[in-house]
Structure formats: C-alpha cells, structure tokens
Amino acid sequence: MPNTHLVIGQGPHKVIALHGWFGHARGWGPFAQHLNGQDFSYAFMDQRGYGGMKGSGGPYTMAQIAQDALALADSLGWNRFSLIGHSMGGMAIQQVLADAPDRVRALVGITPVPAGGVPFDEQGWAFFSSAAKDPGARRGILDITTGNRLSGTWLDAMVQSTLAHSDEAAVADYLVAWAKTDILSRVQGQPLPVLVLPGEHDPALGEATCRATWMAHYPNAQLDVLRNAGHYPMDETPIWLATVIEKFLAGVPS
C-alpha cells in the first residue's frame, strides 16, 4: 500500500520527514514554506491512519511506519537519505535506522520521543489515552506541551486539524506504540550525525529529557534548544527551525 506523501524540492540531499501524533504530511505548518529546495528534496509522509492514509487501517506501529518510509524511499529512487522526525516521528526515524542503518545519513529529532519510549504515571496515561475520543483532551495536551502560552485560536485550529486528518483508532494505537516501544538496544551507539532539537517550553520532551536519552544514546549527537518554542516549533519558530536543520544537514557527509 503506497503511502501518500508531499515532496518539496529537487535537491541532491534527500530527506524523509515523519510527523507526530497529531500531525500529517501536510501538517508541518509554516516550516514547510521555508525549505531550501535546490540543495534538498524533502518527502513528508502520511503515516497509516493520517492525512491521505485515513481509513487505511493499521497496523499502527513504529515498525510499520519504518517499513512504509523505506518503501517510500524505494518508490522515489532514494537509496540514502536523512530523516527528520517530530515527536512520535522521532521514535519512528530511529526505527528506520534500526531496520536499515546503511541507508540513513543523519537523524534530526524535533522535540523527539526517545528510543526507549516515554514513561507515564497513571493519571498522565489516562489523560493521554482519552485524547483518541476527546477533542478537549487533545487541546489540553497541545496547550500543556507548548507551555500554556499560545493563543486559543492556534490551539483550536490544531485540534480541528488533528480531528480532520486522523483516525481515532490510529491515535489510540500510536500512543501505545510511541510510549511503550523500546528499540534502544538496536540503535544505541550508532555513529551517524544526529541533531536533537528540544523546545525551550516543552515540559516533557525538553532539554533535560533529550540530554538523558538522545545525547546519551548517540556518540555524534549535538543538541540545540529552540528558544521561544514548545512542542510544535514547526508552527512556533518555523524559519529558525528550517535554518538550524538545513545548516546541520549541509554538513552531513554524503
């Protein structure tokens, strides 16, 4: 089953971008408008149950996302590529690395889930689990993870976007996938270039979490805290995000 995707640019450095739990291929906000299409080619993929893949059915797992991303690369004729992953997509790009290490040039994790998953207490798990059915919970999660500082207009638009572009079953099952999957033993110590981008106002997947996980897992990782951003820098600081990512990718060996 070919995954729907959006390609931006015609450059020689190929990049596959995997979205987060409330995202989709066309849901990367203003960030996608500020990319360098001469030096890079970006493929933004819909994961199963999202965007153009709504109604596709599962399985809604990290392993399936990785399999679909590799199939997308094959269909585009991309043998080697870099990977960008936002949040849940941060776990998914590491699954691609685990499955096809020889094909991956570099990883960029934007407020990313670590390879060992995310621990929840009972109350937190109940709250996040309710998001599959409850738009109010999705709004609350968006608000909390951006530091309770952004406008209600933006929050409402994000809720409408995630409701319009995701299947309820996918949201429910992917929570289990990104929180409880553990592929750390398969990627730890990989020497490829890695850029980790936590948001200054992200309370869960911020700098401390990234230093304790990503920076400890990858010997050639570098970390850059995104100022004035929480969990959604693609919307909050899109031009700076594009600048930081492309500066890093430009220095990645071919």
Image (spheres, grey):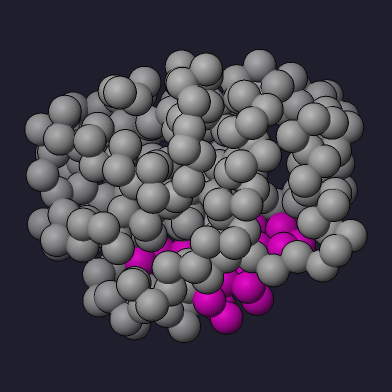
Pick the quarter of the image with the C terminus: bottom left
The one nearer the camera, 97 or 161, is 97
Residue found 78% across the figure and 38% down from its top: 131
Q: Is residue 105 visible?
A: no
Residue found 76% across the figure and 26% down from its top: 159
Residue found 21% across the figure and 57% down from its top: 100
In the rendered structure, the answer to whether residue 13 lies left or right of residue 138 reads left
The one nearer the camera, 72 or 126, is 126
Vertical arrangement, residue 97 with respect to residue 137, above or below: below
Residue found 61% across the figure and 42% down from its top: 173
Task: Provide residue 24's location: percent of width, then percent of height.
Answer: 52, 28
The one nearer the camera, 89 or 147, is 89
Task: Provide residue 98's location: percent of width, then percent of height.
Answer: 30, 63
Q: Which residues are the magenta region?
A: 194-213
Q: Quadrant of residue 199?
A: bottom right
* Total marks in image: 0
Task: Provide residue 58's location: percent of width, then percent of height.
Answer: 48, 32
